[in-house]
Image: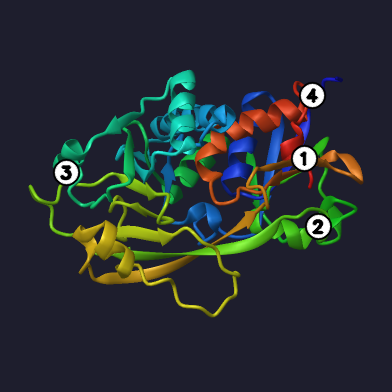
Amino acid sequence: MARLTIGRATVVGAGVFGLCLAHELAVRGWQVQVVYRDPLDDSGASTAESRILRTSYGADDWYTRSAWRSRELWRRFGRTAGRTVLAPTGVLLLGAADQWTRDTMGAARRVGVPLREVDRAEAARRFPWFAPGPADHLLFEPSGGVLLAREAIRAVAACAIDRGVRLRRAEVRAVDARPVTGGRPFAGDITVWAVGPGLPALFPGLSSARVVAQDSTFLDPPAAGPSHPAPPAWIDRDAEWYGVPAVGASGVKVVADRTVAPDAETVPVDPFPYLRRRVPALRDAPVRRHERCRYVEMPDEHFLLDRHPADPTVWLVGGDSGHGFKHGPAWAAFVCDAVEGRIMVPSRFRIR
Protein backbone atom coordinates (compact mmCIF):
# COMPACT_ATOMS: atom_id res chain seq x y z
CA MET A 1 0.00 0.00 0.00
CA ALA A 2 1.48 3.35 -1.05
CA ARG A 3 2.03 5.88 1.70
CA LEU A 4 0.83 9.43 1.09
CA THR A 5 3.32 12.24 1.54
CA ILE A 6 2.22 14.78 4.13
CA GLY A 7 0.92 17.91 2.43
CA ARG A 8 -2.11 20.18 2.38
CA ALA A 9 -5.59 19.06 3.40
CA THR A 10 -8.99 20.68 3.12
CA VAL A 11 -11.62 19.40 5.53
CA VAL A 12 -15.18 20.44 4.74
CA GLY A 13 -17.31 20.48 7.88
CA ALA A 14 -16.67 21.62 11.44
CA GLY A 15 -18.64 19.05 13.37
CA VAL A 16 -17.04 16.52 15.66
CA PHE A 17 -15.68 14.34 12.84
CA GLY A 18 -14.34 17.28 10.83
CA LEU A 19 -12.68 19.14 13.69
CA CYS A 20 -11.17 16.04 15.30
CA LEU A 21 -9.82 15.00 11.91
CA ALA A 22 -8.37 18.45 11.23
CA HIS A 23 -6.63 18.42 14.61
CA GLU A 24 -5.20 14.94 14.05
CA LEU A 25 -3.94 15.82 10.58
CA ALA A 26 -2.25 18.94 11.96
CA VAL A 27 -0.63 16.94 14.76
CA ARG A 28 0.84 14.68 12.07
CA GLY A 29 2.31 17.63 10.21
CA TRP A 30 -0.33 18.43 7.59
CA GLN A 31 -1.27 21.98 6.62
CA VAL A 32 -5.01 21.99 7.24
CA GLN A 33 -7.88 24.30 6.52
CA VAL A 34 -11.43 23.64 7.68
CA VAL A 35 -14.24 25.10 5.59
CA TYR A 36 -17.64 25.23 7.22
CA ARG A 37 -20.98 26.92 6.68
CA ASP A 38 -22.74 27.27 10.04
CA PRO A 39 -21.39 28.78 13.27
CA LEU A 40 -19.61 26.33 15.53
CA ASP A 41 -22.24 26.96 18.20
CA ASP A 42 -25.26 26.23 15.99
CA SER A 43 -27.83 23.55 16.81
CA GLY A 44 -26.41 20.92 14.47
CA ALA A 45 -25.82 17.28 15.26
CA SER A 46 -22.44 17.94 16.91
CA THR A 47 -23.52 20.82 19.11
CA ALA A 48 -26.57 19.55 20.93
CA GLU A 49 -26.63 19.65 24.71
CA SER A 50 -25.05 16.32 25.59
CA ARG A 51 -23.94 12.90 24.41
CA ILE A 52 -23.56 9.70 26.42
CA LEU A 53 -20.06 8.23 26.45
CA ARG A 54 -20.41 4.47 26.83
CA THR A 55 -18.30 1.59 25.56
CA SER A 56 -21.01 -1.09 25.44
CA TYR A 57 -21.33 -2.55 21.93
CA GLY A 58 -21.96 -6.24 22.43
CA ALA A 59 -19.16 -8.35 20.97
CA ASP A 60 -17.76 -5.59 18.74
CA ASP A 61 -14.35 -4.94 20.26
CA TRP A 62 -13.52 -2.29 17.65
CA TYR A 63 -16.20 0.13 18.84
CA THR A 64 -15.55 -0.69 22.50
CA ARG A 65 -11.85 0.03 22.08
CA SER A 66 -12.54 3.20 20.06
CA ALA A 67 -14.91 4.62 22.68
CA TRP A 68 -12.50 3.72 25.49
CA ARG A 69 -9.58 5.38 23.73
CA SER A 70 -11.69 8.43 22.90
CA ARG A 71 -12.59 8.86 26.55
CA GLU A 72 -8.96 9.65 27.41
CA LEU A 73 -8.55 11.83 24.32
CA TRP A 74 -11.65 13.86 25.23
CA ARG A 75 -10.24 14.43 28.71
CA ARG A 76 -6.97 15.54 27.13
CA PHE A 77 -8.80 18.01 24.88
CA GLY A 78 -10.57 19.40 27.93
CA ARG A 79 -7.36 19.80 29.92
CA THR A 80 -5.53 21.44 27.02
CA ALA A 81 -8.35 23.88 26.26
CA GLY A 82 -9.23 24.54 29.90
CA ARG A 83 -12.82 23.36 29.44
CA THR A 84 -14.97 20.72 31.11
CA VAL A 85 -16.04 18.40 28.32
CA LEU A 86 -16.84 15.16 30.18
CA ALA A 87 -19.07 14.76 33.23
CA PRO A 88 -18.12 11.49 35.01
CA THR A 89 -21.67 10.36 35.79
CA GLY A 90 -21.19 6.68 35.01
CA VAL A 91 -23.61 4.82 32.74
CA LEU A 92 -26.26 2.34 33.89
CA LEU A 93 -27.45 -0.30 31.40
CA LEU A 94 -30.85 -1.89 31.97
CA GLY A 95 -31.99 -4.88 29.94
CA ALA A 96 -32.42 -8.62 29.78
CA ALA A 97 -29.58 -10.99 30.58
CA ASP A 98 -29.25 -11.91 26.91
CA GLN A 99 -26.41 -12.64 24.50
CA TRP A 100 -25.76 -8.93 23.96
CA THR A 101 -25.20 -8.49 27.70
CA ARG A 102 -22.80 -11.43 27.84
CA ASP A 103 -20.97 -10.19 24.75
CA THR A 104 -20.67 -6.69 26.20
CA MET A 105 -19.14 -8.04 29.39
CA GLY A 106 -16.69 -10.13 27.38
CA ALA A 107 -15.63 -7.17 25.25
CA ALA A 108 -15.14 -5.04 28.35
CA ARG A 109 -12.82 -7.68 29.83
CA ARG A 110 -10.80 -7.95 26.62
CA VAL A 111 -10.42 -4.19 26.20
CA GLY A 112 -9.93 -3.44 29.91
CA VAL A 113 -13.04 -1.33 30.49
CA PRO A 114 -14.42 -1.34 34.06
CA LEU A 115 -17.93 -2.85 33.84
CA ARG A 116 -19.74 -4.70 36.55
CA GLU A 117 -23.04 -6.30 37.35
CA VAL A 118 -25.33 -4.60 39.86
CA ASP A 119 -27.66 -6.64 42.06
CA ARG A 120 -31.09 -5.49 43.22
CA ALA A 121 -29.99 -4.43 46.69
CA GLU A 122 -27.20 -2.23 45.35
CA ALA A 123 -29.45 -0.83 42.64
CA ALA A 124 -32.06 0.18 45.20
CA ARG A 125 -29.40 1.83 47.35
CA ARG A 126 -27.30 3.57 44.68
CA PHE A 127 -29.82 4.19 41.91
CA PRO A 128 -33.19 4.89 43.56
CA TRP A 129 -34.40 6.86 40.53
CA PHE A 130 -35.03 3.60 38.69
CA ALA A 131 -37.50 0.73 39.01
CA PRO A 132 -35.95 -2.29 37.28
CA GLY A 133 -38.27 -5.09 36.28
CA PRO A 134 -37.88 -8.72 37.37
CA ALA A 135 -36.21 -9.67 34.07
CA ASP A 136 -33.71 -6.82 34.09
CA HIS A 137 -29.99 -7.44 34.33
CA LEU A 138 -28.14 -4.28 35.39
CA LEU A 139 -24.64 -3.34 34.31
CA PHE A 140 -22.80 -0.25 35.51
CA GLU A 141 -19.93 1.39 33.67
CA PRO A 142 -18.29 3.67 36.28
CA SER A 143 -15.92 5.23 33.73
CA GLY A 144 -18.75 6.19 31.40
CA GLY A 145 -20.22 9.65 31.44
CA VAL A 146 -21.76 12.51 29.54
CA LEU A 147 -19.96 14.61 26.96
CA LEU A 148 -20.96 18.27 27.03
CA ALA A 149 -21.16 18.51 23.27
CA ARG A 150 -20.88 22.26 22.76
CA GLU A 151 -17.97 22.53 25.16
CA ALA A 152 -16.32 19.56 23.49
CA ILE A 153 -16.59 21.17 20.05
CA ARG A 154 -15.15 24.44 21.38
CA ALA A 155 -12.27 22.55 22.99
CA VAL A 156 -11.37 20.68 19.80
CA ALA A 157 -11.62 23.87 17.74
CA ALA A 158 -9.28 25.69 20.14
CA CYS A 159 -6.76 22.84 20.10
CA ALA A 160 -6.91 22.65 16.30
CA ILE A 161 -6.27 26.37 15.94
CA ASP A 162 -3.33 26.08 18.33
CA ARG A 163 -1.93 23.42 15.99
CA GLY A 164 -2.14 25.80 13.04
CA VAL A 165 -5.46 24.71 11.54
CA ARG A 166 -7.19 27.55 9.68
CA LEU A 167 -10.97 27.85 10.00
CA ARG A 168 -12.90 29.51 7.20
CA ARG A 169 -16.66 30.06 6.95
CA ALA A 170 -17.99 29.72 3.42
CA GLU A 171 -20.88 28.27 1.45
CA VAL A 172 -19.49 25.25 -0.36
CA ARG A 173 -20.79 23.05 -3.15
CA ALA A 174 -19.31 19.96 -4.76
CA VAL A 175 -18.08 20.12 -8.36
CA ASP A 176 -16.60 16.83 -9.60
CA ALA A 177 -16.39 15.81 -5.92
CA ARG A 178 -14.19 18.80 -5.03
CA PRO A 179 -15.27 21.73 -2.85
CA VAL A 180 -15.95 25.01 -4.63
CA THR A 181 -17.03 28.37 -3.25
CA GLY A 182 -17.80 31.43 -5.36
CA GLY A 183 -16.77 29.50 -8.45
CA ARG A 184 -13.27 28.89 -7.11
CA PRO A 185 -12.02 25.45 -6.02
CA PHE A 186 -10.09 24.92 -2.81
CA ALA A 187 -6.49 23.88 -3.24
CA GLY A 188 -5.03 20.88 -1.46
CA ASP A 189 -3.52 17.44 -1.86
CA ILE A 190 -6.54 15.79 -0.26
CA THR A 191 -10.11 16.81 0.49
CA VAL A 192 -12.24 15.27 3.22
CA TRP A 193 -15.99 15.82 3.25
CA ALA A 194 -17.21 15.53 6.85
CA VAL A 195 -20.45 17.47 6.56
CA GLY A 196 -22.77 15.34 8.69
CA PRO A 197 -26.41 15.66 7.57
CA GLY A 198 -25.28 17.55 4.46
CA LEU A 199 -23.62 14.49 2.91
CA PRO A 200 -26.62 12.88 1.14
CA ALA A 201 -27.64 16.18 -0.49
CA LEU A 202 -24.11 16.94 -1.70
CA PHE A 203 -23.67 13.46 -3.19
CA PRO A 204 -27.18 12.18 -3.98
CA GLY A 205 -27.42 8.51 -4.76
CA LEU A 206 -23.81 7.77 -3.90
CA SER A 207 -24.52 5.92 -0.67
CA SER A 208 -27.40 4.61 1.41
CA ALA A 209 -26.89 7.34 4.02
CA ARG A 210 -30.08 9.13 4.98
CA VAL A 211 -30.85 12.07 7.22
CA VAL A 212 -33.01 11.31 10.24
CA ALA A 213 -33.85 13.10 13.45
CA GLN A 214 -34.39 12.25 17.09
CA ASP A 215 -36.53 14.16 19.57
CA SER A 216 -35.43 14.86 23.14
CA THR A 217 -37.48 16.07 26.09
CA PHE A 218 -35.83 18.10 28.86
CA LEU A 219 -37.28 17.93 32.37
CA ASP A 220 -36.71 19.65 35.69
CA PRO A 221 -34.85 17.22 37.97
CA PRO A 222 -36.17 16.48 41.46
CA ALA A 223 -34.50 18.27 44.33
CA ALA A 224 -31.30 16.51 45.33
CA GLY A 225 -31.39 14.64 48.61
CA PRO A 226 -30.91 11.22 50.23
CA SER A 227 -33.85 9.78 48.29
CA HIS A 228 -32.77 11.40 45.03
CA PRO A 229 -28.97 11.27 44.67
CA ALA A 230 -27.57 12.35 41.34
CA PRO A 231 -28.25 9.55 38.85
CA PRO A 232 -25.95 8.16 36.18
CA ALA A 233 -26.73 8.41 32.50
CA TRP A 234 -28.83 5.40 31.57
CA ILE A 235 -29.69 3.23 28.59
CA ASP A 236 -32.85 1.15 28.86
CA ARG A 237 -32.35 -1.29 25.99
CA ASP A 238 -35.60 -3.25 26.09
CA ALA A 239 -37.77 -0.18 26.61
CA GLU A 240 -35.76 1.70 23.93
CA TRP A 241 -35.28 4.86 25.96
CA TYR A 242 -32.19 6.54 27.33
CA GLY A 243 -31.51 9.47 29.59
CA VAL A 244 -28.91 12.01 30.61
CA PRO A 245 -28.79 13.58 34.09
CA ALA A 246 -28.86 17.34 34.54
CA VAL A 247 -25.21 18.05 33.76
CA GLY A 248 -25.94 21.07 31.56
CA ALA A 249 -28.30 23.97 31.88
CA SER A 250 -31.31 22.26 30.35
CA GLY A 251 -32.28 19.69 32.97
CA VAL A 252 -32.64 15.94 32.59
CA LYS A 253 -32.78 14.74 28.98
CA VAL A 254 -34.91 11.72 28.09
CA VAL A 255 -35.02 10.31 24.58
CA ALA A 256 -37.04 7.61 22.87
CA ASP A 257 -34.57 5.58 20.82
CA ARG A 258 -36.40 5.98 17.53
CA THR A 259 -36.02 8.28 14.57
CA VAL A 260 -38.33 10.53 12.58
CA ALA A 261 -38.01 12.41 9.31
CA PRO A 262 -36.11 15.68 9.95
CA ASP A 263 -39.02 17.84 8.77
CA ALA A 264 -41.81 15.69 10.21
CA GLU A 265 -44.51 17.76 11.87
CA THR A 266 -44.83 15.41 14.80
CA VAL A 267 -44.77 15.98 18.52
CA PRO A 268 -42.12 14.16 20.56
CA VAL A 269 -43.11 10.83 22.05
CA ASP A 270 -44.70 11.36 25.46
CA PRO A 271 -42.05 10.16 27.94
CA PHE A 272 -44.28 9.94 30.99
CA PRO A 273 -45.76 6.45 30.49
CA TYR A 274 -42.19 5.17 30.33
CA LEU A 275 -40.98 7.32 33.24
CA ARG A 276 -43.82 6.28 35.54
CA ARG A 277 -42.92 2.65 34.92
CA ARG A 278 -39.11 2.77 34.83
CA VAL A 279 -37.88 6.09 36.26
CA PRO A 280 -40.46 7.03 38.90
CA ALA A 281 -38.27 9.85 40.25
CA LEU A 282 -39.29 11.78 37.11
CA ARG A 283 -42.95 10.77 36.98
CA ASP A 284 -44.16 14.31 37.74
CA ALA A 285 -41.19 16.33 36.47
CA PRO A 286 -42.12 19.58 34.69
CA VAL A 287 -41.17 19.75 31.01
CA ARG A 288 -38.71 22.51 30.15
CA ARG A 289 -38.42 22.14 26.39
CA HIS A 290 -38.02 19.81 23.43
CA GLU A 291 -35.12 19.50 21.01
CA ARG A 292 -34.76 17.84 17.62
CA CYS A 293 -31.32 16.66 16.51
CA ARG A 294 -30.56 15.71 12.89
CA TYR A 295 -27.92 13.19 11.94
CA VAL A 296 -26.92 10.81 9.15
CA GLU A 297 -27.88 7.18 9.58
CA MET A 298 -26.44 4.20 7.74
CA PRO A 299 -28.68 1.13 7.45
CA ASP A 300 -26.18 -1.02 9.35
CA GLU A 301 -25.22 1.81 11.77
CA HIS A 302 -21.52 1.51 10.92
CA PHE A 303 -19.61 4.69 10.06
CA LEU A 304 -18.74 5.75 6.53
CA LEU A 305 -15.14 6.12 5.32
CA ASP A 306 -14.15 5.80 1.69
CA ARG A 307 -12.65 7.56 -1.29
CA HIS A 308 -15.01 9.24 -3.70
CA PRO A 309 -15.24 6.95 -6.75
CA ALA A 310 -14.63 9.89 -9.12
CA ASP A 311 -11.49 11.19 -7.39
CA PRO A 312 -9.07 9.18 -5.22
CA THR A 313 -7.86 12.34 -3.46
CA VAL A 314 -11.36 13.01 -2.10
CA TRP A 315 -12.59 11.19 1.00
CA LEU A 316 -16.07 10.90 2.49
CA VAL A 317 -16.36 10.62 6.26
CA GLY A 318 -19.64 10.40 8.14
CA GLY A 319 -22.57 8.14 8.86
CA ASP A 320 -22.36 8.67 12.61
CA SER A 321 -25.75 6.91 12.96
CA GLY A 322 -26.48 8.59 16.28
CA HIS A 323 -23.56 7.04 18.16
CA GLY A 324 -20.55 8.69 16.54
CA PHE A 325 -19.87 11.76 18.68
CA LYS A 326 -18.09 9.94 21.49
CA HIS A 327 -15.76 8.25 18.98
CA GLY A 328 -14.60 11.53 17.43
CA PRO A 329 -10.93 11.61 18.55
CA ALA A 330 -10.13 7.91 18.04
CA TRP A 331 -12.09 7.80 14.78
CA ALA A 332 -10.05 10.77 13.54
CA ALA A 333 -6.82 8.85 14.08
CA PHE A 334 -8.29 5.86 12.24
CA VAL A 335 -9.35 8.08 9.32
CA CYS A 336 -5.89 9.66 9.17
CA ASP A 337 -4.28 6.23 9.03
CA ALA A 338 -6.51 5.40 6.05
CA VAL A 339 -5.87 8.71 4.30
CA GLU A 340 -2.10 8.31 4.74
CA GLY A 341 -2.18 4.76 3.39
CA ARG A 342 -1.22 3.11 6.67
CA ILE A 343 -4.29 0.84 6.76
CA MET A 344 -6.90 -0.55 4.40
CA VAL A 345 -10.44 0.63 5.06
CA PRO A 346 -12.53 -2.29 6.35
CA SER A 347 -15.42 -3.23 4.08
CA ARG A 348 -18.03 -2.35 6.68
CA PHE A 349 -17.02 1.33 6.51
CA ARG A 350 -16.86 1.64 2.73
CA ILE A 351 -19.51 3.28 0.54
CA ARG A 352 -22.65 1.16 0.59
The x, y position of residue 299, in whole percent, is 68, 52
Q: Residue at x 29, y 71 (%)?
A: 287
Mark 4 or 3: in front is: 3
The x, y position of residue 101, in whole percent, is 43, 36
Disc 4 and disc 2: Cα gap in Å?
24 Å
Disc 1 and disc 2: Cα gap in Å?
15 Å
- Sequence order check: which comes first, mark 3 or mark 1? 3
Q: Which residue is mark 4?
A: 341
Dot 2 amino acid type: Phe
- Sequence order check: which comes first, mark 4 or mark 1? 4
Most extreme residue toward the front is: 134
Q: Which residue is mark 3?
A: 124
In the image, which disc is placed on residue 203? 2
**How would you rate the neighbour count of disc 1 (Cα within 10 Å): few for under 14, some for 14-19, many for 20 or more?**
some
Mark 1 or 2: in front is: 1
Dot 1 amino acid type: Arg
**How would you rate the neighbour count of disc 4 (Cα within 10 Å): few for under 14, some for 14-19, many for 20 or more?**
some
| The N terminus: image quadrant | top right
- Sequence order check: which comes first, mark 1 or mark 2? 2
The x, y position of residue 161, in whole percent, is 56, 38
- Sequence order check: which comes first, mark 2 or mark 3? 3
Residue 221 visible from this viewpoint:
no
**How would you rate the neighbour count of disc 2 (Cα within 10 Å): few for under 14, some for 14-19, many for 20 or more?**
some
Q: Which residue is mark 1?
A: 350
Disc 4 and disc 3: Cα gap in Å?
52 Å
Disc 2 and disc 3: Cα gap in Å?
51 Å
Residue 281 visible from this viewpoint:
yes
Dot 4 amino acid type: Gly
